[in-house]
Amino acid sequence: ASGMWLAKGFPIISQFEKQLQEGYKADVRQTTFPEPGLTELNAWVKEKTQGRIERIFEKLEGTPGAPTALILANAVYFKDEWQEKFKVENTKPLAFNLANGEAPAVPMMNRRGGYSYLDKAWGKAVLLPYRSQLAMVLAVPKAKPGDFGALFKDENFAALFDSRHWNDGEGSVTFPKWTSQFDLDLIPLLQSL
């Protein structure tokens, strides 16, 4: 879900607002900051994530003396089940090789089965489908743990999303249990514009 909150009286070009609403399905609202804008924004996030994310702001922090004029927000919550579940009894502590050479033991899920996979000189990848139409692509470099440079070269990265490079076969997949969270502070980026 995407949204933009503008301080009342802050001008917006109508074509830009239309593009946000139609092209990005974004909510565009005018409000007063800090309140009730902050309360409205947090309520929107809670609604759009079905209560899984309670709020994204405790308070508004900006440049002292400068009023908040605009907040861009994107709330994403993803939860799905694997098409072929990883059995709990197959999750065991195993070494996870870090780029710095350390290898701490972490809970590793393991499953044997049929997979779509990619095996190139620069790396390997496997496709793990979810019950929905989505899938996770797990990719690892062949060079050394954490050396993802080769994976992100244009032609190599493109191969990860081109089915002509993939094969089907039997194999075993082992990777750590994980959760993911991402925060991005847009203030420095926007100030540089």
Image: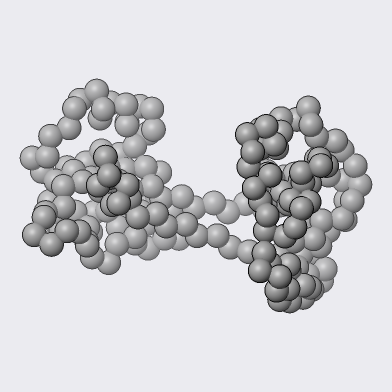
State the quadrant of the N terminus. top left
> Looking at the image, is 59 positioned above or below residue 32?
below
Q: How is the image coloured?
A: one colour
> Looking at the image, is 123 positioned above or below residue 63?
above
Q: Position of residue 62 (x, y in %)?
A: 20, 59
Task: Tell me which residue sits at (76%, 44%) in the image.
Answer: 122
Task: Tell me which residue sits at (67%, 64%) in the image.
Answer: 99
> Looking at the image, is 173 positioned above or below residue 114?
below
Q: In this view, which residue lies farthest toward the top?
A: 15
Q: In this view, which residue lies farthest toward the right?
A: 170
Q: Position of residue 176 (x, y in %)?
A: 71, 65
Q: Is residue 10 visible?
A: yes
- In the picture provided, is 50 more to the left or to the right than 154? left
State the quadrant of the C terminus. top left
Q: Position of residue 65 (x, y in %)?
A: 8, 59
Number of dots carrying numbers: 0
Q: Considering depth in this image, is 32 or 163 the residue closer to the camera?
A: 163
Give the quarter of the image for residue 144. bottom right
Q: Position of residue 86 (x, y in %)?
A: 77, 60
Q: Is residue 132 visible?
A: no
Give the quarter of the image for residue 109. bottom right
> Looking at the image, is 19 positioned above or below residue 188?
above
Q: Considering depth in this image, is 22 or 156 the residue closer to the camera?
A: 156
- In the picture provided, is 159 more to the left or to the right than 115? left
Task: Tell me which residue sits at (21%, 41%) in the image.
Answer: 29
Task: Tell me which residue sits at (64%, 47%) in the image.
Answer: 149
